[in-house]
Image (cartoon, rainbow, N blue to C red):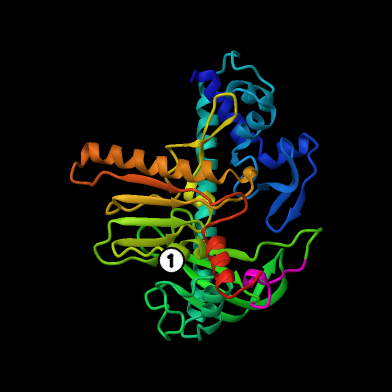
Amino acid sequence: MSPELAALRDEALTNVSCLAWAEAQGWKLTRVGTEFAGPCPKCGGTDRFAINPKKNVWLCRECDVGGDVIFLAQHMLGLFFAEACELITGRSARQRIDPEQARRMSEERDAAERQRIATENKFREKARKDAYEVWEYALGRPMDVVATYLGQARGLAGGAIDFDAPDWHAGMPLRFIGDRPYWHDGKVLLRAPAMIAAIQRADGRFGGVHQTYLGLSQPKGKAVLPEIEGKAPPTKKVLGVKKGGAIRLMTPSGCRRLVMGEGIETTLTARAHAFEEDTAYWAGVDLGNMAGKAARRASGGMQHDQPDMDDLECFIPPDWVEEFVGIVDGDEPERRTIEKVTRGLRRAKRLRAEARASNPDLPPLATFMVPPGGAGTDLNSIAMSDMAEIHGED
């Protein structure tokens, strides 16, 4: 990168925020909690595009991409990096720049980045502490509702987990709260029973909680949430830090294989109905954490099945794992589930190969993907269908 382009980059990142750029383009965004959300200028929708002004980053859930203001211009307008920098700053990358001015802008950008990281770390630590209070509050409460939810509503009974045993959840990071409030945009939408799962970070420390709001009289046992602008919020919420973490449902001593699905239900389906003694079963919390960032093309496009190898904040399997198995849900094609699981597996395998170059004692990593049974299905829906046949249900 030339000194002139580097200075242009620093000016764009320091002087123009993602929100300011979006507003200058006339994009219609509405404040939702701490973010501004609305239709994606590239792929549409209603609220799939969001900007977090505190972190000064953006994300589109359908495009499966996000980042800083420069990449915002690149992605939305199909620009190369230099073109985006020129558009944002209004200056040419060929325009000569005073070295002192370039140094000052570089220092300003570095200071802004340090401040952003400090603010984000402070926010994360508060969220982690809040999550730990929830986890402690759930300690020792009866797990009958969770047993009914997993065993009956989600079709896991009759397998390797005996949900009738009082200690069926022994060793699992699962707890229960009978009247957990569901917060949305500063308001409590409802109170409902909730399965609480602990998220452990890569170092094994507590990171956060995954909350599944339950309604056992409903299909799949999930709570019914009131609609907001014609759409019900998700029945699952994370509080705390999830990046790089996992819900470690079972980790036998001496295991060598790790099976991971996106959710608790999918992962426990493999644990209940395809149990292997030398296997750990961990849930990846969500697809973004399992997949990590995708590789970018120079023109602003994405290679959705290829990992950004600079992203080390997503889940990476521990050194003891010799076989890493990713379970794919058969979600709608727009979610790019197969591509996301594929890039997570590819990142893990490439990182292990790099690590073995300097430490040959590490075992090589083999990766496998369990494909979905069909569109709209996942491993758990297959188990639920089998359960329905056993009980003679339509």
The residue under the point 59% across, 70% down is 388
Amino acid at the residue labelled 1: His
Horizontal and vertical percent position of residue 235: 64, 66
Q: Quadrant of residue 386?
A: bottom right
x and y, in percent, of residue 393 in the image: 64, 72
**Residue indicated by mark 1:** 273
Q: Nearer the viewer, residue 124 or 241?
A: 241
Give the camera-side residue of 230 and 87. 230
x and y percent of residue 40 in the render? 72, 41
Q: Give the class, few, some or many, for how many residues have Cα within 10 Å of label 1's Cα (few <14, many ≥20).
A: some
159 or 125, which lies in front?
A: 159
Residue 224 is one of the magenta-drawn residues: yes
Q: Residue 67 appears at what percent x and percent y?
A: 58, 39
Q: Main structural element of the magenta stretch: helix, strand or loop?
A: loop
Q: Secondary structure at mark 1?
A: helix
- At a point 53% along the width and 50% down the height, the residue shown is 372
Residues rendered magenta in the picture: 216-226
